[in-house]
Amino acid sequence: MNLKALDILNNVFGYQDFRPHQNEIIEHILGGGNALVLMPTGGGKSLCYQIPAMLHSGIGVVISPLIALMQDQVDGLRQLGINAAFLNSTLSYSETRHIEQQAHDNELDLLYVAPERLMMPRMLGLLDRCDLALFAIDEAHCVSQWGHDFRPEYLKLSVLHERFPHIPRIALTATADEPTRQDIIERLQLQQAHRYITGFDRPNIRYRIIHKNRPLEQLLSFIKNEHRGKSGIVYCLSRKKVGATAEQLREKGLNALPYHAGLSKAMRQQHQARFLAEEDLIMVATVAFGMGIDKPDVRFVAHLDLPKSVEAYYQETGRAGRDGLNADAWMTYGLQDVIALRQLLESSEADEKHKRIERHKLEAMLGLCEITTCRRQALLGYFSEHLSAPCGNCDTCLHPPETWDGTVTAQKALSCVYRTGQRFGVNYVIDVLRGKDNPRIEGFSHHRLSTFGIGKELSVQEWRSVFRQLVATDLLAIDVQGYGGLHLTPKSRPVLRGESQLQLRREKPSKRTNRQKISLQASPSTPLDALLWEALRTCRKRLAEQQGVPPYVIFHDSTLKEMIKYRPQDKEQFKSISGVGEHKLNHYSDEFLAVIREHFGKNETNDGDTSGNGNVVAVPIRNATDDHPS
């Protein structure tokens, strides 16, 4: 193990041990090698290039896709005493010249730039004159046309290999299936690079997917019952729905803001800054929001519309629980979501090859929604990772769904679609099946069909569930270029003929679930701990406001919780807390130690908690994580 790297990990970042592959990657980069790194969000990607940049004599240049992300990361690094800066359009001319001079004089450890700025002749000329340690390409999936967040400007990053062939390059992402990985390698010319894949599992996230039935009421119930006063993100498909949902949440007393590309740049920046700084704000957004968001205390990510792929779902839900504490990935979806996404896909200007791949991705997402076994096993399996046993922390594990033999019911549905001409939508077909007295049905003489009224035993909601599953399993297709009419597929024939059986999922009302599977709790467990928790958060917020940075840049929630658990009484004990390096020890220990001492001096006997004696009960194990404030 590289002892200098370990020393930086301990004394700068405040962590005791490296996570899997981190030290190996650092030594590989220091040896001049290139790397492709796939780690889950919160898995410790940033350390893999930050520590080599600090150990090398030159500058580590980080290509980052978002201005707000650069600001956030640089603020965090400076809190650790690391010389870091960014170059982007928010800087004045004099500020830009100052940072360029710092880079030229080798006074920086890390310099963050967007891919567009990197390609400017002035920027490339500056790098030609600098001593370079490495190039780190963050969010590397953006380079792939098969990835979920393709950005054309990333395609030009092959210039790094061509212009700086001897400078190590490290491409990093949390989300990439095998085709996307191959695309990254080819487009960035990383054919000889070592691959490091540490797994995709986020065990602290509980996955829950329910069918739509008054989705706003469902969302409000979820937030108020489980996450009132907590930070979260709500994703919607359209700008209009984002605005309406944010307004409705505010009307219900929740602190919510909209974010989408239709807002002015200044307003988007203002809303994002508030989201990072406030600890109870809900951001309602399109997918234009979120990539690279380092806010560690996002307690939930909710989807009011179906994501277009498993990769997008994984990336978006991964913004929850970066601190390792409990978090929820909650989604409600319906058949209309499928129609909307397929209409968007078919109306796009993409070529047929690209559309075919996107169709497969959407089908995989539908399969994840309708699965009756462990969702986490299916999610990880999509990325070619095997989970040997059910996770115990998703809705299908905690409340296994009932299944039933739906063969006859499916035959009724398929027959009705066929006999009505394969051109009507779900609502109309359900009305025919339930024998509804409807002038439109009579106008088409469909009340005389043999399928009229043969489905009265199921409610409208139950029939919606059946049709949703038939579409998800490709037994029915939707005419997305017309008016959403249903039609049979080749797969429906064996079911109609009785040659294959069909098991369907029976919908049940959603229930609240416990958190016994996860050891790290998001809330203090005793009244005395809760008092100290609020006192520590107040101290952190005051310090953050004084410096103009988000509270988590001072310390993460997980670090505050260790202060509650171990109750340090002096600087030596305080240094043993995970996330406390030398710089933060010197700047913040007195403030937080004073809060802890005062709290236990006043309250240690108030609730009979005999453990509140001010002693550190154990030495915490500090692991390296992407969730340090960088």
Image: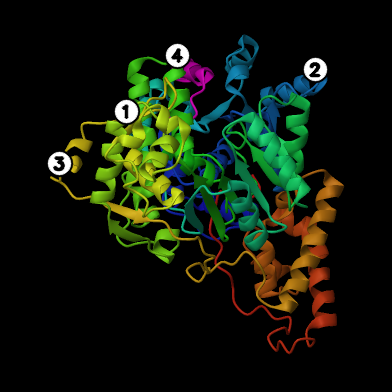
Query: How many residues crowd mark 3 within 10 Å: few (<14), some (14–19), many (20+)?
Result: few
* 3D distance between C-alphas at marks 3 and 4: 39 Å
Question: Marks 2 and 1, how far apart in space?
Answer: 64 Å
Quick one: 574 or 475, which is closer to the camera? Answer: 475
8 lies above or below 59: below
Please provide the residue range marked out in magenta: 147-164
Pinpoint residue 377: horizontal percent, then vertical percent: 35, 54
Q: Which mark is residue 497?
A: 3
User: Which residue is at 59% across, 57% downward?
Assistant: 10
> Against 623, is 436 above or below?
above
Q: Alpha-carbon distance for marks 2 and 3? A: 74 Å
- CB contact under 8 Å: marks 2 and 1: no
First reached walking from the N terminus: tag 2 or tag 1: 2
Within-10-Å neighbours for mark 2: few <14, some 14–19, many 20+: few
Of the two numbered discs 4 and 2 on the same chain, state the one appearing first in sequence. Answer: 2
Relative to 25, is 61 on the left or the right?
right
Secondary structure, magenta segment, majority class: helix
Q: Is 331 placed left or right of 35 in the picture?
A: right
Q: Nearer the viewer, mark 1 or mark 4?
A: 1
Judging by the rendered image, the residue that carries numbered circle 2 is: 93
Do we see residue 199 in this rendering?
no
**x%, y% of residue 600?**
80, 79
Q: Which residue is mark 1?
A: 422
- Disc 2 residue type (three-letter): Tyr
Whole-percent x, y for residue 528 in the image? 74, 78
- The three-letter amino acid code for the residue at tag 4 is Glu
- Give the left or right position of residue 426, taking residue 134 as reference: left
What amino acid does circle 3 point to? Answer: Arg
Q: Which mark is residue 349?
A: 4
Q: Which badge, 3 or 4, comes first in the chain's sequence?
A: 4
Mark 1 vs 4, N-terminal side: 4
Q: Mark 3: which secondary structure? A: loop
